[in-house]
């Protein structure tokens, strides 16, 4: 989603490796030069290895750099700037995870984004109260003037935060999603093949 909406993403940060699919797909974007992944738990690398078919062998991709450690610390200590920052932590009710939904975390993310940069917050809707989602949205909106909500399918959403107005150029986006890896990604993940299907989310 972020790589479709951004006009030319070259640097990305993914907080939370998981199965490695987000980082793997980002690395497939032709203009993407570097994808940094911050992962706190070393055992998750084994999960990504086992998911190699789904994530395009992300751990073997020279564009991808996995940094073991706290994503919040990386944002505070590294001077690196990004076009896209994806925050994909575990469920917010798990110990310590709530730190990745705070105003301070979002402020740190904003400080590391380039001018047209986008921040994307994955959030699941199961086993959480509507008030929890409202709190996360309000907190994100207190830092990012522009926020959109996208449905990924099932019970997950992505909140997209931006400093500047999010303008959707229909001609650009129609051409964008007709290219790879976006064409295959949308068909696989969202079961859509055209711009109307994309915007239905």
Image (cartoon, rainbow, N blue to C red):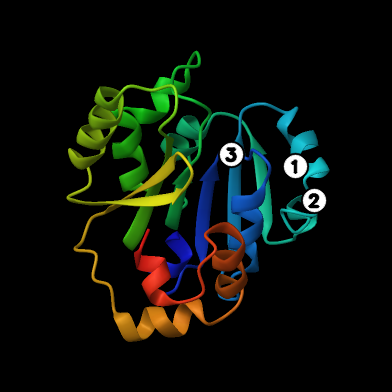
Q: Which residue is drawn at 62% across and 62% down?
A: 188
The reply to whether dot 3 and dot 1 touch (C-beta < 8 Å) is no
Q: Which SS class for mark 1?
A: helix
Identity of the residue drawn at 60% across and 75% down: 30
Q: Residue at x 55, y 71 (%)?
A: 182
Q: Which of marks 3 and 1 is nearer the N terminus?
A: 3
Check contact, mark 2 vs mark 1: CB within 8 A.
yes
Across and down, in percent, residue 40 comes to 61, 28
Residue pointed to by mark 2: 52
Q: Please, is residue 27 above or below residue 78 in the view? A: below
Looking at the picture, tell me which residue is in the foreground, 156 or 118: 156
Task: Provide residue 198's location: percent of width, then percent of height.
Answer: 41, 67
Q: Name the residue under label 1.
A: 48
Image height of 2 relative to 46, above or below: below
* Mark 1 residue crowding within 10 angstroms, few (<14) / some (14–19) / many (20+): many
Q: Earlier in the sequence, mark 2 or mark 3?
A: 3
Q: Height in image: 116 above or below 37? A: below
Residue designated by label 3: 38
């Amino acid at each position: 989603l972020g790589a479709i909406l951004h006009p030319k993403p070259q640097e990305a940060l993914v907080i939370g490796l998981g199965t490695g699919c987000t980082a793997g797909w980002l690395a497939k974007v032709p203009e993407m030069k570097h994808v940094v992944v911050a992962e706190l738990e070393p055992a998750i690398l084994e999960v990504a290895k086992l998911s190699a078919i789904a994530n395009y062998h992300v751990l073997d991709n020279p564009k991808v750099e996995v940094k073991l450690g706290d994503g919040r610390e990386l944002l505070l200590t590294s001077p690196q700037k990004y076009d896209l920052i994806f925050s994909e932590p575990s469920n917010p009710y798990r110990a310590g995870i709530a730190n990745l939904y705070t105003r301070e975390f979002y402020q740190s993310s904003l400080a590391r984004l380039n001018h047209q940069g986008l921040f994307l917050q994955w959030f699941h809707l199961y086993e959480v109260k509507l008030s929890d989602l409202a709190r996360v949205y309000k907190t994100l909106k207190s830092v990012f003037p522009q926020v959109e909500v996208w449905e990924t399918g099932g019970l997950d959403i992505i909140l997209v935060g931006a400093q500047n107005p999010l303008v959707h150029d229909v001609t650009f986006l129609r051409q964008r999603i007709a290219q790879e890896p976006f064409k295959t990604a949308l068909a696989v993940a969202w079961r859509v093949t055209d711009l109307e299907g994309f915007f239905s989310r």
